[in-house]
Amino acid sequence: MDLLSFLIGLMLLLPIQRQDNGLQYIENVIGKFSGIKDYTVDVRVHLDIQEVKAPDMDAKVYYKEPDKVKIDSKGLFFLPKDVGVFNPRKFNPKDFDISVIDTLTYNGDPAVRVSLTSKKDEAKDHKIILTIDKKDWLIKEIATVPSPGRQVSAKISYGVFDGFELPVKIEVNLDVAKVNPQMGGFDGERRRGGGVKGNVEVYYSNYKINAGLSDEIFKKEGDR
Amino acid sequence: MSLFAIEVQKTFRRWRTYIGFAAVAGAVILLEVIIKLNETRMAHSYAGNLNSDFLISGNVLNAWVISAFIMNSLYVHVPFLITLVAGDMVSSEATSGTIRFLLIRPPSRSKIIAAKFFVMLFYTAMLIVFLALLCVGLGLAFFGSGDLIRFQTGLPHIVILSEHIAASRTALAFLAAILSMSVVGSLAFLFSALVDNSIGPIIGSMAIVVIFFVIGNLPFDFLESLRPYLFTTYMNIWQLFLDDPINWQEVGKYALALLGYDVLFFGAAFFVFLRKDIKS
């Protein structure tokens, strides 16, 4: 009897231990997204960056699980990497070392901050901190250091579409130091730049979820 | 037939007039073919650091970007092609021995020199229009249209012009390039009025252009006070039309300076030509 009580107690404790290292939080967030096989969404990007002068940019973004993305735009379109395409599946626990930083209250709801460090050698400097709303299992903030000298943080606002909570606005703050002073241009006419620092607002509308997007859509022109 | 038409005919009968057009055609075709052959790599390279922070969609390398690049590459070299004709406008009459015959006929000297000057301007305009048509025409055929993305040294480092204004801005830039190149033409024209051979004006005006460009780009503070007096300082006026928004005050300043040099060089040529001694 005592042994049985011990085993039952141990089984009850296990999820708590899993939560303590943050794994369960990430699985809950991914689980919340698991009903979404694909989506298309209209995206508008507004850049408020001192180094870049550009009009608002529009595109249609196609997503298909697990990580297929296609961007279709008439004009030039810049979408912040890491945070622009909403896909919690990219935080697959198999790819990261996960740990809980702290718990907090976020907009009156209980939340937890979880740290993810890439297990891949080529991205070992890639660190991500997610602020997860424990009430709705939604990522409210993402702070990422894709590589030394680059910091990207994002606040996410959600709306409900076909029963799924998906972003309607992501406010991104970029702080990219002078990691590489070459801003762009053709060889020989390269301009020396001073990094990128500023805000990017990304607006999402007109979601079409689980429309059964074909893999063909995601093939690059050269692949066809 | 008007004096202007006669001078146009004389100018466009000379084979050297077409060297500029051939050189422009060769350079533009070569550049666009090279870029086309390396399009994917160059598009990625052109976006530079932006690739690290953004997913980029759209036609990065397009006719407007290519045209701006070619203008940027050639605006130091095209002056040479202008001087080939402008430096020959007046001096060729002396070289071919027709100057006396020309000046004893009824049209006044002032009319003759004015007609020659306007033909020089016409040639300059034609060469730039040809460059524009070739850049944009080939660019549209090879790369299509799109937003114009430009990288510059000052803030903002990156300027993006929507496709619908990129075309008009490119057209304005080429028009401004005509004004810019007219100053080099005027200088060569002045030298052409001063001497009796064509090589001197061509080499002389190119030497001045090169020296002014060098002085204007040397990073020495003590040269700063000289720069406003160098016509080469204002020759990149065309780039102002690719800014957003256009700094019209700066455009006005540059345009006035260039027009001023045009008037100055033509005035000097006019003065010299009116007093030209054809008896010796």
Image (tube, rainbow, N blue to C red):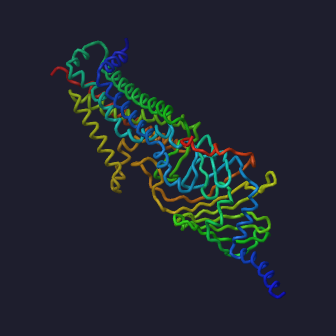
Looking at the rendered image, the quarter that the N terminus of chain B falls into is top left
Q: Is residue A58 visible?
A: no
Give coordinates of residue B32: x percent, y percent: 43, 36
Residue A118 sits above or below residue B25 on the image: below
Along the horizontal axis of the image, is A177 left or right of A204? left
Comparing B71 with A207, the one in front is A207
Farthest-out residue, bottom: A2
- Number of labels in the image equals 0
Q: Say which residue appears at 48% left-offset and 44% top-offset.
A: B40
Residue B176 sits above or below residue A18 on the image: above
Q: Say which residue appears at 74% left-offset and 66% top-offset.
A: A28
Give coordinates of residue A192: x percent, y percent: 44, 55
Residue B233 sits above or below residue B155 on the image: above
Please identify the quarter of the rendering in which residue B207 is found: top left
Looking at the rendered image, the quarter that the C terminus of chain B falls into is top left
Comparing B100 with B92, the one in front is B92
Farthest-out residue, left: B280
Comparing A81 with A33, the one in front is A33
Give coordinates of residue B65: x percent, y percent: 49, 40
Residue A197 sits above or below residue B265 on the image: below
Please identify the quarter of the rendering in which residue B212 is found: top left
Along the horizontal axis of the image, is A185 left or right of A22? left
Q: Say which residue appears at 81% left-offset and 51% top-offset.
A: A162
Along the horizontal axis of the image, is A60 left or right of B83? right
Q: Is residue B236 visible?
A: yes
Along the horizontal axis of the image, is B11 left or right of B142? left
Give coordinates of residue B69: x percent, y percent: 44, 41
Q: Say which residue appears at 40% left-offset and 26% top-offset.
A: B126
